[in-house]
Image (tube, rainbow, N blue to C red):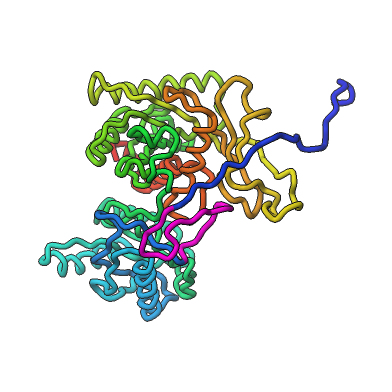
């Protein structure tokens, strides 16, 4: 039909111009040999580095382990826990070497009774000393099925305990890289959360618009129920807040989850985080940056509805804190589900380009393929060493902070290096990433027919 209508198609990719944003300088703890590091290709490791020491984070004084993997012997589990404790100590954590009780083997079939029974035995020892259990290490079998979800639900809703799950296939090799990754997660979880690394620009208050004024950064994600679950199934609106505890470092986070009606942004959650930020930092946020994650491409009409609902919720939350409180608000919509892909035009001509042909982390495109009048851009902030990288589209819907294109692009790219669960830059800005994880976790807590507040 194309020939009949006189339409021809070019079989070559569209050539566009982009630029690569420089990566940020990362600051690590002074007890390590490498105190600062510049990740040239979006990746680093914790070798010769240490976590940032803080007064109220990164300490495990009491811990224990329970093993649900039948193919892991008790001696192997003990050796793994010892190696993990050493890795945490080397990485800069205050981690006590001996568990409260020795490793206990249990059957996955009786996960709830095993967890509660073991916790009860531990607390019989700790309660007379006025202590609580800081961490539970759980070893999972290879095909754990729903076991992971059951453990998280029981530990976080019934026992109220921080847990760290480890797969059996990684326990026996005990590779340093895996142990270091587990140490990252433990440090970020325990005792109000430790800092794995911080941005040098953040410490020097050089982040665009964030460094000079107390700023709170929101990330929101909504996970909608399946249509077959009915129109009254709750969507999980998960808001994860960045810099609510340690402005201007932008590393510590607070999260809350509420089941909401479809398309509704809860102003009460925003108010709670504003108050939490003020209590933690003793500053009133003068700027609000709100990253909102939407999986599908949103039409122009839908964009106006999104802006109206979210901006109204933010303004009402601010007014409920104080009638005269009116911070400057920037709302950015984040989209991943699109068909745009970026490839390097000089693939194979230099050592700085990945063998996969993907662009370097920090590559940004804000012309030609973007909207002719709207404020949007594509950013590939992660290192795509395999497969095809998918850039993320950031669409600035509302901006009272007068961000320039360079400023918002640089800020977003810098934040992608602060994700606490890995030693690499991530593809989506971390507050949205955390919100997505929190929304997924919330589904583990909901029982059939339960639509109450979580």
In this view, 207 is above or below 369: below
Residue closer to the observer: 289 or 164: 289
Which quadrant would the C terminus be assigned to in this image?
A: top left
Tell me which secondary structure the magenta stretch mostly adopts.
loop
- Which is more toward the observer, 89 or 38? 38
Answer with left or right where residue 63 lies relative to residue 375: left
Give the quadrant of residue 119: bottom left
Report x, y in % for residue 394.
53, 33
Residue found at the very far left of the displayed protein? 128
Q: Does the magenta stretch include residue 42?
A: yes
In this view, the residue in front, 46 or 68, is 46
Q: Residue 79 at x, y = what percent? A: 38, 78
- Describe residue 312's horizontal placement relative to residue 98 as left or right: right
Q: In this view, does 143 lie above or below 214?
A: below
Q: Who's the residue at 55% across and 52% down the image?
A: 42
Q: Where is residue 407 in the image (x, y as percent from the top left)?
A: 50, 33
Specify the segment rendered in magenta: 27-47
């Amino acid at each position: 039909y194309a020939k009949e209508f006189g339409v021809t198609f070019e079989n070559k990719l569209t050539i566009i111009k982009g630029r690569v944003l420089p990566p940020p300088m990362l600051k690590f703890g002074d007890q390590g040999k490498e105190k600062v590091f510049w990740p040239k290709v979006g990746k680093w490791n914790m070798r010769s580095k240490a976590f940032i020491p803080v007064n109220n984070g990164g300490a495990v004084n009491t811990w224990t382990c329970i093993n649900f993997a039948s193919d892991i012997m008790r001696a192997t589990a003990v050796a793994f826990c010892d190696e993990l404790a050493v890795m945490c100590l080397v990485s800069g954590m205050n981690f006590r070497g001996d568990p409260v009780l020795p490793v206990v083997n249990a059957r996955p079939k009786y996960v709830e009774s095993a967890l509660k029974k073991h916790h009860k035995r531990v607390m019989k020892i700790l309660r007379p000393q006025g202590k609580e259990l800081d961490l539970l290490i759980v070893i999972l079998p290879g095909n754990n099925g729903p076991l992971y979800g059951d453990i998280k639900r029981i530990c976080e809703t019934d026992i109220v305990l921080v847990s760290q799950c480890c797969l059996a296939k990684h326990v026996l090799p005990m590779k340093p890289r895996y142990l270091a990754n587990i140490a990252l997660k433990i440090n970020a979880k325990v005792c109000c959360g430790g800092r794995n690394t911080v941005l040098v620009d953040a410490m020097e208050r050089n982040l665009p618009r964030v460094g000079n004024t107390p700023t709170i950064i929101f990330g929101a994600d909504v996970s909608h129920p399946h249509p077959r679950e009915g129109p009254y199934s709750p969507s999980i609106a998960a808001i994860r807040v960045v810099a609510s505890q340690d402005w201007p470092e932008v590393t510590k986070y607070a999260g809350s989850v509420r089941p909401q009606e479809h398309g509704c942004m809860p102003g009460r959650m925003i108010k709670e985080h504003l108050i939490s930020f003020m209590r933690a930092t003793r500053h009133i946020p003068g700027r609000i940056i709100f990253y909102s994650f939407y999986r599908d491409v949103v039409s122009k009409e839908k964009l106006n509805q999104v802006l109206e609902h979210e901006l109204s919720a933010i303004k009402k939350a601010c007014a409920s804190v104080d009638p005269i409180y009116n911070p400057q608000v920037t709302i950015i919509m984040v989209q991943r589900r699109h068909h745009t892909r970026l490839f390097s035009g000089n693939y194979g001509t230099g050592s700085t380009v990945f063998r996969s042909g993907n662009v370097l982390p920090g590559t940004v495109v804000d012309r030609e393929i973007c909207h002719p009048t709207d404020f949007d851009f594509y950013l590939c902030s992660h290192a795509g060493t395999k497969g095809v990288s998918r850039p993320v589209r950031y669409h600035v819907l509302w901006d009272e902070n007068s961000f320039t294109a360079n400023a918002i692009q640089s800020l977003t790219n810098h934040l992608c290096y602060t994700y606490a669960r890995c030693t690499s830059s991530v593809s989506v800005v971390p507050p949205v990433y955390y919100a997505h994880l929190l929304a997924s976790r919330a589904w583990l807590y909901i029982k059939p027919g339960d639509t109450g507040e979580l």
